[in-house]
Amino acid sequence: MAKVKHVLNVQARTAGTTNDARRLRKTGLIPAIVYGKGIEPKCISVNATEWQLLSRNELNILSLVEDGKETLVLLKEVQHDPIRNRTRHLDFQAIRMDQKIKAHVAVRPGHALPAGASAGGLLEQNLHEIEVESLPQDLPEEIIVDVSGMNLGDMIHVGDIVMPEGVTAVTHADIVVFTEVDENAAAAEEEEAAPAEGEEAAEPEVIAEKKTEERAAARDERKKAE
């Protein structure tokens, strides 16, 4: 299994219409589906409260339990309703312990600050997930990267990260994950790029003047036509 075993109770349901799914959500359940290579897709439902508690963790592999029977799955998609702030639908992919899988794993900096922090450095994270490939039992919950040795201007690419044993990065090695930037230099560049107060105020006047000229020209054209 994965480093942490996450168990989710589910129950079978009949595939229905959008209205059926809406009625299901009103009863405190979330419609979901399980699919995989060589198996028929199966419609299930999940208790919304149980899912809300479980989703606070970093989730990749879960064990779905239905009537005492466990199915090992990979969480593939979560459809969220931002207006009602609730989960609308879940997609799970059934997997086998002897077959490698691909999944997106969260990447985080270690607790130690970069060396460049003492010189006004600011750690920027450009990538928050890395796609990896591994057997299910080797898939990590997250990848922690030691950034303590980073000085101003240093970058950590995907290829620089030492993956856990049995795990291979699928994301391109040249993609930047972390950058230690000079916060003072960045602020100075933003200040230079900002327009001067006089220039900003002059722009509406130029536009207004142009519109006045256009209206005068239009009046002259109408007089000629008359």
Image (cartoon, rainbow, N blue to C red):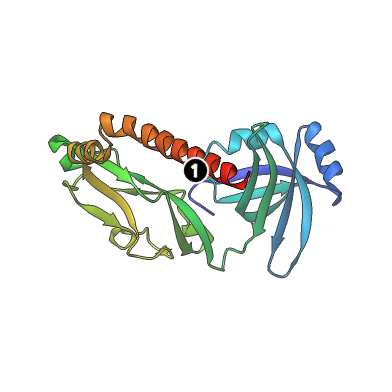
* Circle 1: residue type: Ala
* Residue 64 % position (x, y): 68, 49
Dot 1 falls on a residue whose secondary structure is: helix
Tally of marks: 1
Residue at 63% x, 34% y: name it: 52
Residue at 76% x, 60% y: name it: 41
Identify which residue, 180 or 8, lies in the foreground.
180
Up/down of 98 relative to 224, above or below: below
The quadrant the N terminus occupies is bottom right
Q: Is residue 147 visible in this depiction of the protein?
A: no
Residue at label 1? 217
Residue at 63% x, 43% y: name it: 226
Identify which residue, 174 or 148, lies in the foreground.
174
* Residue 90 % position (x, y): 68, 48
Residue at 39% x, 65% y: name it: 172
Identify which residue, 133 or 135, lies in the foreground.
133
Q: Is residue 221 left or right of residue 85?
A: left
Is disc 1 surrounded by few (<14), some (14 to 19) or many (20+) residues within 10 Å?
few
* Residue 152 % position (x, y): 16, 46
Q: Is residue 109 left or right of residue 21?
A: left
Q: Is residue 82 visible in this depiction of the protein?
A: yes
* Residue 61 % position (x, y): 57, 52
Q: Quadrant of residue 157?
A: bottom left
